[in-house]
Structure formats: C-alpha cells, structure tokens
Image (cartoon, rainbow, N blue to C red):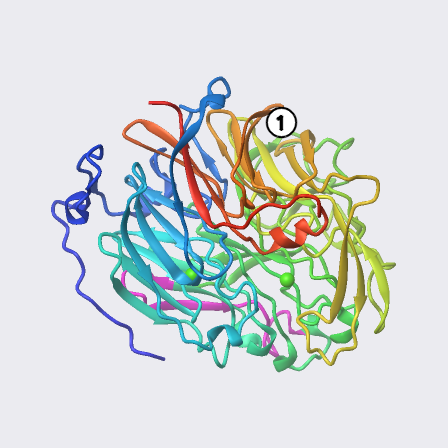
Amino acid sequence: MRERVRMPRLSFVSGAVVLASILGTESGAQSLREFVPVTDAILQNPSPEDWPMWRRTLDGWGFSPLDQIDRSNVEQLRLVWSRALHAPGRQQGTPLVYGGVMYMPNPSDVIQAIDAVSGDLLWEYRRELPEDVCDFMMSGVCTTNRNLAIYENLIIDTSVDEYVFALDVATGDLVWETEILDYKVHPANQSSGPIIAKGMVISGRSCMPSAGPEACVITAHDARTGEELWRQRTIPRPGEPGDETWGGVPYEERRHVGTWMAPSYDPDLNLIYIGTSVTSPAPKFMLGGTENTHLYHNSTLALDADTGEIVWYYQHLNDSWDLDHPFERLLVDTNVRPNPEAVDWINPRLQPGERRRVVTGIPGKTGIVYTLDRVTGEFLWATPTVGQNVISDINGATGVVTENSEVVFSRYGEEVYTCPTAMGGKDWEAGAYSPRTNTMYMPLRNACARMASLDDGRDSLYSLSMRNELSPGTDQLGTVRAISAESGETVWTYEQRAATMSLAVTGGGLVFGGDVNGRFRALDDETGSVLWEINLGSPVSGFPVTYAVDGRQYVVAGTGTGGNASRFSSMTPELRPSSGSNIFVFALPD
Ligand SMILES: [Ca+2]
Ligand SMILES: [Ca+2]
C-alpha cells in the first residue's frame, strides 16, 4: 500500500473557520459566513437548509423539510444560475450543500466548491488518475462519481484509482488518502461515494469479475485520518457461513457480488444497510447449479457499524438476469398495515397497524417493493409495481422467494423474455420518501428484454445478451409511482413517454425530478399532477437536491449523458435530447 499523505489540519477558531474570508468571495451579495465543522450530530439531524450527503439524511429519504417553494407558488420558479461541468465521463452527481457552499462531484473525481448563491467557483480539485486505470474497470461507469460525504472540515470521496481521500473544505487541498484496493490486482470500480456513520467513512463498490472475491468489500475508514477500520466481504470464503450456498464453486471463481450504491445508517441501532448485486456470470447453471443461492448476492445486508459483521441478511432474488439490488434503502418508522387488495405477499404473523422500524423501498431492478423489519430482517410484505415475471411467489411467513422456472436459464443458448430489463424496472436513479405523506416516490420504467445465455467463455460480464423493449401494451416508458409506506397501496401513478430519472421530495409538497428527454418538473406529492416543468435540453442524469441560504430556497437539477439515459433513448427514438453536462439552480423571484 502507498503511504498515506498527511497534511496539517486547519485549526478551528472557537470551533469555526471563517470560510468566506479565506475563499475571498467576489459576489457582493454574499455575506460572511462561518464554517461550522460537521459533526455526527449534524449529520444525524441536518439543518433544513443543507443537503449534506447523498440522500440528504442517513435514513436514505431524499427528503428536505424546506417549504418556501410549495404547490401554490412553484409555477413561479426561475433560473438563478447555471454552470457547465467539464470532466470526462457520465454525469450522475449529487450536489452536497452545506453552509451556503455547494460541493459538486463530477466524473473522474473532479470536485468543485461553488458559491451556492452566485454559482461562482471557489475551488476545483482534479484528481490525477493513472492513464491505464479504466482499462481494468467497467467501461462506461469507470469514472462515474455519484456522491460525496462531509465530516468536520473534510470533503470525502472514493476514487477511480481505488483510494478513499479527503479534501480541505476551504481550499480543496488533499488532506489524506488511503488505498482501498490495488486497481491492477483488484479492480473494483467505485462509481458511488461514501456516507459517514459515527465518524467512519462507509463505502461500497462494484467489484469487477477479474478482481476476484477479495475485492467485493464494504469498507470503513476513520474520517479524520483515513485509517482503515474494517472491511466486510460480500462473498464467503470456504468454511465461512454461506460457503455452502455456492455449490462447491472454488473461492477464486466466486465473483462480482458488488455494493455499488451508497448505504443507509441507523445510529440508534448502529446498523448499516447496504444492498448487493448479481454474480458473474449471472445464469446460475454456469455457477454450480440453479438450486444454489450464492450468498450474499442480491441481498440486503445489515452490518454492525463497529465491526462490519453481518447481523442479518435478506436475499431478494436468486438472480439469473443481472437484476441487481444495490439501491437506496429507506429507513422509516411506520404503522404497518399492508392492504391485501394491493399487496401480493404479506407475513401472516403481522398484526395490521402495528408500529415497526422498517427498511423499505424498491431495492432492486425488479421494481418490487420490500418492507422488512430493520431490527431483525423479518419479512413483512412485498409487492410488484411495474410488470415483472421473474418472481412467481414469496412465502409471507418465511420471506423465501421463488423464481419463475420458465425464465431461469438452464442451458447455453437458451432465450427467455424477462420483465423488467437489466436497466430496470428501477435502476440507480433514486426514489424518495416523504414523512409528510408517509409515501415513497419511485422513478420506474415499463421495459422488458429478450435475453439469451451465452457460451462466451465467460468473456463478458454476465454471459448474457439482451435486447430491450417497451413492456407489452404501453408506449409509456417513464413512470413515477407514489406508494404508501403503511398500506403498500399505489396512491398515484404518473406516466409518460420518456424514461424518468432521480427524485427528491420536499416539505412544500413537491416531488422534483427529471427525465431522459431533458424535462425537469415538480409533481404534487398528493396527486402526481405536474405543477411546473422546464426543458433543460439534456437528460436530467444528476440527482436533484434543494437547499436554502439566507432564507431563500433553491432547487438544483443536473444534466448530462447518464449511461442508461442513452439506452433508454433507444426505446424512444423520436426523442432527441442534447447531451450537455450542466447544473441549473432555480428559486422563486426575489
Ligand atoms: Ca469518486
Ligand atoms: Ca449489474
């Protein structure tokens, strides 16, 4: 391992650094602001004005309590500032906003600090990456950089070249860096960044097949120093619990159970919730037999934050089709009363209306909602949303999932028709949860695929070919669906031609989100009506956020070429957006 770079830390004056004076703000409108170092208490209960991590809070909600912009005035929104983003790769960034400064993750680990009021650049960090690094990674997503974390006076990210690193918030200077994996030996692919749990930097990664099982890890580092505290593999070694689920496949051939999206964290239970992806190859007849479950692929893992140990797991799907399950976990305390008219699979022991601490949402590409007890992992209920034919049953009493044998590959060259496609249903584009309505809002797609199992010597990632199609009986690819966290009922569905992208929801009763055709809009959180819309020109591939400075609320949309955006476009070829990477910031008139 390379030596960590240690640099002197800023000393805090009365616990605060006068950031604005260091940065030399030129916008006269901006007042001098004190930088308050970010603590665990702040991250566990952030100021309504800030958006200090991927989904704003550790419970993964993507919710802001800000309500200055509401259903009655949202039609007056206007552009306040915009900025083009220049960095090689796909733009899927989440602005991190804290204390009036926006920290923007761009592809290739380019990070900018921007005055959140004026849009003026304060500093820019461009990580020097080895020229050959993407030769080892997944083409297309190698340089993706979805989110940052903040702790004390540090902006923290994982890097394309497999380090975790920290920048000084005031200058963008590197403060520490720690190698997680040697990219030439264990190329994992770090498309998402970390969250902070109790002063620890928690991060997952994709895990390329060539990297072997030792690269399929979730890691914890000390946020102050970068020291590694623990790492937890997603694939058991021989003799470890779960080894028996691999049907005797040699350890070195157990591959690609990744954790490529950021986790959630419950400080009270001290548990980290993170989801996993499919194996490589995906068809299980190539991997010891379809009767094996290959833990811990396509599972929710609850990890002890102090040790990384798996406290419980729940497997959502024995996956032959690249239907990953790494998406946002929503940690919600709610009455649980699944409506049998609306929900397919319910635990018979559940007392309707009982209060539970749950982990819910749509964790995987199948589009199925799962609600589990987040203390124990007990299955509570699950139900499909968009059309799916890969799961035929879930045993409510045990939570055990049965796949549809008609679409489970059993030989090379077999062709099947699956819904959804491997782009989802749902994919990395995040949904959101509002405590105002106790409802989750999910961007989904009506798409299926003709898939075949390939005898390709395992040259490709999954040994699958696939051709995507719109779901039968509809020409509407894009959906936003509102689902009650208590009853599982669909409250409303919004459908349109273009594929829908990530969402954020606010205390003003608004669901903000965009689509592949450049439209960014606000929906009514109770009805799904479109209350405001603007054409930004390019796919809205960034994660929308909202923040406030000096009493004024802002809404941010990010555009760019977003990977799936182009593949979704091929199903709606008459829509021809441009592909510029920009952020656009809106507010009500002064
Ligand atoms: Ca990164
Ligand atoms: Ca995958």
Regarding residue 61, the answer to whether it shows in the image is: yes
Magenta span dominant secondary structure: loop
Regarding residue 380, the answer to whether it shows in the image is: no
Residue 176's spot in the image, x, y percent?
A: 28, 66
Dot 1: few (<14), some (14–19), or many (≥20) neighbours within 10 Å? many
Q: What is the quadrant of the C terminus in the image?
A: top left
Which quadrant does ligand 1 occupy? Answer: bottom left
Q: Which residue is drawn at 76% across and 75% down?
A: 286
> Tag 1, which secondary structure?
loop
Q: Residue at x 46, y 58 (%)?
A: 145
Residue at the far left: name it.
13
Residue placed most toward the observer, 248 or 550: 550
Residue placed most toward the observer, 303 or 460: 460
Q: Give the range drawn in magenta.
A: 221-243
Horizontal side of 235 relative to 128 (left or right) equals right
- Image position of 394 with respect to 64: above or below: below
Residue 421's spot in the image, x, y percent?
A: 73, 54
Residue 474's spot in the image, x, y percent?
A: 80, 39
Per the image, the residue denoted by label 1 is 528
- Image position of 365 with respect to 320: above or below: above
